[in-house]
Image: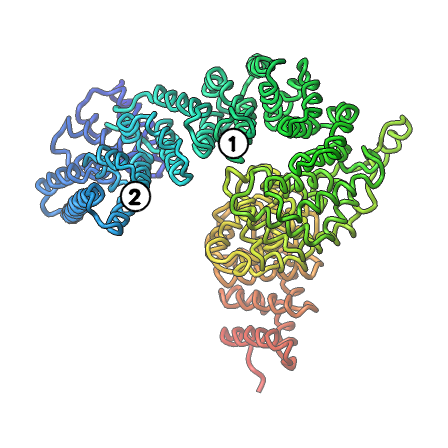
Amino acid sequence: MAEAEAMQLKEEGNQHFQLQDYKAAIKSYSQALKLTKDKALLATLYRNRAACGLKTESYVQAASDASRAIDINSSDIKALYRRCQALEHLGKLDQAFKDVQRCATLEPQNQSFQETLRRLNTSIQEKLRVQFSTDSRVQTMFEILLDRNSEADKLEKAANNLIVLSREEVGAERIFQNNGVALLMQLLDTKRPELMLAAVRTLSGVCSSHRTRATATLHAVRIDRICSLMAVESEEMSLAVCNLLQGIIDALSGEDKQEHRGKEEALVLDSKKDLKQITNHLLDMLVSKKVSGQGRDQALNLLNKNVPRKDLAIHDNSRTIYVVDNGLRKILKVVGQVPDLPSCLPLTDNTRMLASILINKLYDDLRCDPERDHFRKICEEHITGTFDPQDMDKNVIAIQTVSGILQGPFDLGNQLLGLKGVMEMMVALCGSERETDQLVAVEALIHASTKLSRATFIITNGVSLLKEIYKTTKNEKIKIRALVGLCKLGSAGGTDYALRQFAEGSTEKLAKQCRKWLCNASIDTRTRKWAVEGLAYLTLDADVKDDFVQDIPALQAMFELAKASTPDKTILYSVATTLVNCTNSYDVKEVIPELVQLAKFSKQHVPEEHPKDKKDFVDMRVKRLLKAGVTSALVCMVKADNAILTDQTKELLARVFLALCDNPKDRGTIVAQGGGKALIPLALEGTDVGKVKAAHALAKIAAVSNPDIAFPGERVYEVVRPLVSLLNTQRDGLQNYEALLGLTNLSGRSDKLRKKIFKEKALPDIENYMFENHDQLRQAATECMCNMVVNKEVQERFLADGNDRLKLVVLLCGEDDDKLQNAAAGALAMLTAAHKKLCFKMTEVTTQWLEILQRLCLHDRLSVQHRGLVIAYNLLAADAELAKKLVESELLEILTVVGKQEPDEKRAAVVQTARECLIKCMDYGFIKPVS
């Protein structure tokens, strides 16, 4: 019984294979293998399953199954050939050659075997040639690099060649096999910066996407040595070592997305111990005085990138828990560093901000309240343990730590502000005579007053302190920070006109001072950055933003700061926030009149709109920003390094771009200054809201611009996906409409673009909008389809049986809207010209087809009439029987009337097409010419 069932399953598998359902075939063969012990049947089943493996590109499984069939019958020619094919795909050319050699011996006349034999022989010779030439090149390069008497240009060339070679898989493997790691370590020992840099970059290539090589390199070079190289002052070296470590971490954790098999899989079973060791060394680097500011930044960058989960759907957050338990105190120590104190570690401008970001990411990665409570307790113990009544320096560090946490997880920072003695210490430091103390206290007050509830507490306690510091201090750095604190408190009511914190005119005075500092090039960049931060708060006030956009020098000073090659991480966010405020591109809650009346009746506060926040004022501000060169500043900001350009900043930039693109007349200016290209990365990466806003701005540009100018070269293909994402029914009608206009423009450019739109699965959405009740959406979708039907894959969808696509197009030709008719008739004309089958199908989809065609041929609008006549000609040319049916109808009379008209300049194409239709009828012999 079992044997009979196995035979039946084999036959089922064969049927599935013929229908190209390879997964079902594998399932049937696998079930049959469990039921039979018959050797001949077993060999057949393994052989057949190997064929499925080849079809599904599961080459390891295919080779294994073919080997089992060969074990049963060593002369099984099909199994030998299938194993040969699988081994060739796996790159094992010598083994594949042996198999096909055996096949050719068994069947010498088989041309396929002879051809494969020749091809593999050529491939093996080429592989050996490359291998030997690569080996000798590697050897020569190392000889030049390790020879102390080598000339400088020879050294440089050899180093660069070695780096390039290591980036190719074959080259990396040859370097590794030829004792490359040991030789590269000798280069590191030379202490010559250029050779050390080349060695590190080569090691990066060797480790990239290869677990075995990465593990061997890590153990050979040792993590402590790698970290000591990253700790140097040189930014270039520090970054190169950071890339090396990232490559090792990716390879060990499987982030390289490589499929490991055979020896590779067996050699590296568990890399958790190595990863933990790397994490421990990175945490130790954070608090070591021997580490440079650059090295500390790179250690923080690596922790930021590799410790928190990339996707919160993954349950395991053990790496974060480990770092919280073993390294949070070290991170807090970095956050609490005060640059002016003698005990301060070497830092860069970005170190503390990176540490705050890491604290924020770790806190967000915690899964439950007990984990968050544990995190909070460590922070509380660290801060309260730092306080010392006898040592002012320690108190300053404690407040600086709170300030750093407030820039990370704000809720946690708020809880820490409530700790006994924290607010009191802030107040005490404000009154200190030492400028360092005042600086730290003012910054802490600024970060503490981010929320209205906290700001009201500080307004009663801190405003007088800030005003006093502002008036008395001679230090510009402290003065400007005190001003920003006042700016922040002054804007605590947001855009609500009725919730002004300070007296009328006070915010304008603060803003004027900020603008003055911003324009003062003699002040250092870090201090001027605080002026931008102040404006980021104050521009919530419409009077302030109106004054600001009229101050061209201040605007351009801000743009120059944003364009600087090494901007502070926070400046981009502050500039973007200021621009969002000036363009009113923030989200505004819809005001429902009934709820406003209810709120007034119950004596609740109702937000009021500032008169200068109305649309005409906003449009004027946008015009002034464009004139001042905002687009080029935004383009520079988008190009900033990803560590600096956070997802939140990208969202703000996308909002600004969308506001700038609102008026079609301004879009040409934006395109000319590179705005079209800059929007593409914003539409592909960032927050969901940011991607939608950027995609909408792209749609606005794509709808009215020449794509070859707006998105030159290959970039135009990257625009398609963001536009297609806007066709989602969750997006609003305007976004749908402008995306359709953009896709219509793109699909009219080339078939390659039409293929890309088809590949992105836009067609079902376009068809969906052709059914839409909204006239403009339906028209835009039909116009898009009119361009898309030129593509062969789209035509095949119309040719397929069992759908109403053609019927919909025919019925749309009968609508009353001229533009809709024009688009539908254009689509139908191209479809019927491309395929005779569609000419017949058109007459079957609806009984009204002839009436609709006659209406098109009599249409008042010449473009619609011309398209109708082209459809008539296509039907006449398709088949004599179909032509006879048309001639017997009133269509002949219509064609005759149109054909007899005098062809003036406008009507020439219409009259000519009608005459061609009549000539076709004469060719069939249905009508005769009048003498």
Compared with 872, 8 (above or below) is above
According to the image, label 1 marks what residue?
A: 351
Callout 2: helix, strand or loop? helix
Amino acid type of disc 2? Ile
**Of helix, strand and loop, which one carries label 1?**
helix
Nearer to me, 547 or 667 = 547
Q: Which residue is mark 2?
A: 163
- The part of the image, by quadrant, that contains residue 524 is top right
Report the front residue among 589 and 341.
Answer: 341
Residue at the spot x=63%, y=13% of the render?
Answer: 389
The front one of 158 and 15 is 158
Task: Note whether 499 is above or below 5 in the view shown.
Answer: below
The first of marks 2 and 1 along the sequence is: 2
**Left or right: 909 with respect to 28?**
right
Q: x and y percent of residue 718 in the render?
A: 50, 49
Within-10-Å neighbours for mark 1: few <14, some 14–19, many 20+ = many
